[in-house]
Amino acid sequence: MQFGFSYVGLIFLLMLFVPNLLWTKRKPKDYDRYVVNENKVLLALERTGEVLVTGAALLFSNFNWKPWSGRSWWLIAAFLCMVLYEIFWIRYFLSERTMRDFYRSLLFIPLAGATLPVIAFLLLAVYGKNPVLGAAAVILGVGHIGIHLQHRREIAS
């Protein structure tokens, strides 16, 4: 693992944060009704994972593009997950912005808004041979996906 700035990490984080910033003004109808029921342990894991993923993605240069190799496919797969994540957001912003719209699958990927970025950062960790980002993404995934799974169950009942 090499300390140093990662422009690839920055690109991934921008792809993650920009739609989320837009979302703060375009939340699903009745979203606040579900937030009050969030599991506090999952919320703590989500917040911890967010901080750790952000730091690891920016502070390790392992993720920057290297000459083409067999490992390059991991980066390509990670980037494709982030592209699908952007498509998820475009579809959501063009919808009526209900809770069902927010939790619809994308190309058979359940909870796409929660799972795609976690998968992308896990793949980026494999590409960069970086267990710190891998562990951070797992922590984020348990919290983030867990919370969104809870929300989806609530809207189904």
Image (cartoon, helix red, strand yellow):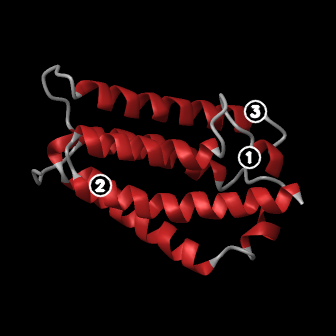
Q: Residue at x 39, y 34 (%)?
A: 78
Give the distance between the C-alpha atoms of the residues marked 2 and 1, in whole angstroms: 27 Å
From the viewer's perspective, tell me whether residue 43 is left or right of residue 78: right
Query: Can residue 98 be seen from the camera position used here?
Result: no
Q: Position of residue 47 (x, y in %)?
A: 48, 69
Q: Which residue is mark 3?
A: 94
Label disc, if present, on residue 127 of the rendered structure: none
Q: Residue at x 57, y 44 (%)?
A: 19
Residue 14 occupies quadrant: top left
Q: Indicate the amino acid at tag 1.
A: Phe
Q: Position of residue 157 (x, y in %)?
A: 90, 60
Q: Residue at x 28, y 38 (%)?
A: 8
Give the distance between the C-alpha atoms of the residues marked 3 and 2, in whole angstroms: 32 Å
Provide the secondary structure element on which disc 1 rests: helix
Q: Which residue is mark 1?
A: 102
Tag 2: Cα neighbours inside 10 Å, few (<14), some, or many (≥20)? many
Q: Are marks 3 and 1 in contact (CB under 8 Å)?
A: no
Q: Is residue 33 above or below residue 70?
A: below
Give the distance between the C-alpha atoms of the residues marked 3 and 1, in whole angstroms: 11 Å
